[in-house]
Amino acid sequence: MHCLVYSSTASIGLTEAELQRQLGHWRSTNTSLNITGLLLFSTEGNIMQVLEGDATVVHQLYTVIAADIRHRNLVKLADGPVPSRAFADWSMQFRCVAPADFSRLTLRPDAPPEHIRNLVPLLEAFMAEEPPRGV
């Protein structure tokens, strides 16, 4: 099992409503690829996504995301093997978050290894704070 976490900034004025309209398609794609994870969107246009699945498939999907012109300032925050899925029940959970929460959850790419190891548990705890809105 592999986990990749990235952050980016939307290059166009994305809104929560626009992302909600796309979620069905993205969730279907992730289900067909056996990818799980979550997508956080800050009201300031920042994005963080966790992708879990087979390493080859995760990296192929990340390559597609990296080529998507809707992203800029793409930064890989974590990329490596994990013992199991942290978000196994979610093909792509979605939450729109306040900028302060986004800053609290986002890591710098030069963060110390122990901070990166704590990223997924931190996200798990954050996502448990309120009931999920869809699978």
Image (spheres, grey):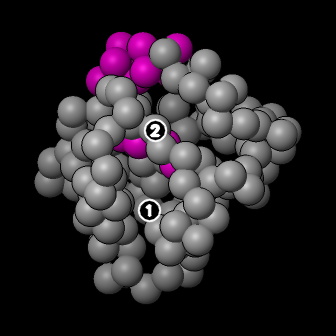
Q: Secondary structure at mark 1?
A: strand
Which corner quadrant of the image does residue 81 belong to? bottom left
x, y percent for residue 60: 51, 32
Specify whether 81 is left or right of 37.
Answer: left
x, y percent for residue 77: 51, 64
Q: Residue at x 34, y 61 (%)?
A: 126
Q: Which residue matches tag 1?
A: 78
**Magenta-tinted stretch:** 25-40
Q: How many marks?
A: 2
Q: Residue at x 27, y 62 (%)?
A: 125
Mark pair 1, 2: CA separation: 19 Å
Outermost residue to the right: 12
Which of the image's four quarters has the C terminus? Answer: top left
| Pick the front one: 74 or 57 | 74
Q: Residue at x 72, y 36 (%)?
A: 15
Seen in the picture, residue 73 relative to 54 is either above or below; the reply is: below
Is 36 contained in the magenta span?
Answer: yes
Specify which label sits upstream in the sequence, 1 or 2. 1
Whether residue 71 appears in this view of the structure is yes
Specify whether 10 is left or right of 83.
Answer: right
Which of the image's four quarters has the N terminus? Answer: top left
Seen in the picture, residue 130 relative to 104 is either above or below; the reply is: above
Q: Secondary structure at mark 2?
A: strand
Residue type, label 1: Ala
Q: Which residue matches tag 2?
A: 94
Residue type, label 2: Phe
Seen in the picture, residue 123 relative to 61 is either above or below; the reply is: below
